[in-house]
Image: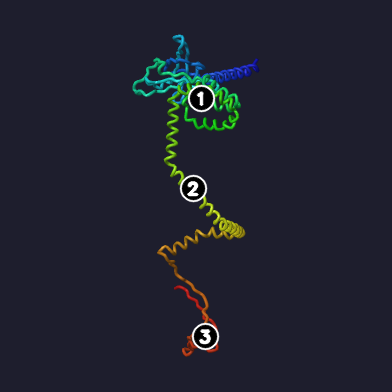
Amino acid sequence: MRGLWPTLIKSAIFIAVTVFATAMLAVSITNGGGGGHHYTAIFSDVTSLNNGDDVRMAGVRIGQVGHISVIDRRRAKVTFSISSSVDLAATATATIRYRNLVGQRYIALDQGSGSPDDQLKPGSTIGIDHTQPALDLTTLFNGFQPLFQALDPQQVNQLSYEVIQVFQGEGATIDNLLSQTAELTSTLADKDQVIGEVIDNLTTVLDTVNQRGDELADMITTLQHLVSGLSEDRGAIGSAITGLGGLTKSVGGLLEQGRAPLKTSIESLGALAGNLNQDAPLVDQFLHNLPTKLNTIGKLASYGSWLNFYVCSITGQIPTPAGYALIPNDPTDPSKGEHPDPNAVGVAPVNARCQ
């Protein structure tokens, strides 16, 4: 029985940790946690919006959807909660947007253009005139149906994602959409019948685009400003490109001229390193004594731009002219003084010492 207790304790700990981890995972998957202030919004359509979906503001998750119900037989009432640190203005708007192509959605809140001091009290309702349902992708994609049938699945997914981003006003992704369309041009070259069907369905697509007229107008205006700015600076851009070409040419010439001397210097440096390596003990001794020598020389030059030193001993020999030699004096005989010897050739020793 004693041997069974450790096993039971270990099993209990394992079960507790597993249950806790599973609960945390479940809370994470379901976006658990719904504290804060509660509000209500009235929508005309909340298709695919579920309890627990995100509530975001400026792309940041600030809450979640709590409950969805039907009112007046044709409208949806959505109750959601947001963080208590976020205050909504009285002009706040709520829009249902697509989170991804799988079909998940979320509620995007915007403070509107009203005064920030005029706030919406917790528990208030955002009317249907301040809400907007999600884009009806069924109608939109039905118009592109013939086109999608001629594409492979990967191209369909990419194009669908770009279309959603553009029409929802999620960002300036029109460039990506145009590049995807350009890549598909070669595929559509022989698809006359498909293109005809697309044109037949274009009316429905344009109706959908018309519903997002403001977002499309903003996008076109921004693109026009960009193109106008580039056009105004075309002179500076052209000059910069010309200057860059000249700089590249000059650098190329400099490298071409300096390549041969640089190669010679590197080869000479290798020979110098080899010589220093052969006399490594001598070099080491020189470097060891160099600080002492420099310190001594520094003292000699400390009084100005000259070397200040005294000669205490000079020893050497001075050659004498031919036919002349110095005979030292004889202190015992004054008559024997210095006189030249015409047959003598020699040197005169010099030996001076400081006193």
Q: Percent x, y for residue 69?
A: 47, 11
Residue denoted by label 2: 244
Sooner in the amino-acid sequence: mark 1 or mark 2: 1
Sooner in the amino-acid sequence: mark 3 or mark 2: 2
Q: Across the whole image, how many numbered discs are drawn on residues?
A: 3
Select label 3 or label 2 by which is in front: 2
Residue 6 or 49: which is nearer the viewer? 49
Q: Percent x, y for residue 121?
A: 37, 17
Dot 2 amino acid type: Leu
Q: Residues within 10 Å of mark 1 (few under 14, many from 20)?
A: many
Dot 1 amino acid type: Ile
Q: Residues within 10 Å of mark 2 (few under 14, many from 20)?
A: few
Q: Is the N terminus in the top left, top right, bottom left or bottom right quadrant?
A: top right
Distance in Å between CA atoms under marks 1 and 2: 41 Å
Residue 353 or 147: which is nearer the viewer? 147
Q: Percent x, y for residue 102?
A: 55, 21
Dot 3 amino acid type: Ala
| Residue 276 location, quadrant | bottom right
Sooner in the amino-acid sequence: mark 1 or mark 3: 1
Q: Is the C terminus in the top left, top right, bottom left or bottom right quadrant?
A: bottom left
> Residue at left 45%, top 73%?
354
State the colouring used for the structure image. rainbow
- Identify the disc placed on residue 325: 3
Residue denoted by label 1: 164
Distance in Å between CA atoms under marks 1 and 3: 119 Å
> Residue at left 51%, top 23%?
202
Observer able to see residue 21: yes
Q: Is residue 125 above or below residue 249?
A: above
Disc 2 element = helix
Q: Is residue 246 above or below residue 40?
A: below
Disc 1 element = helix
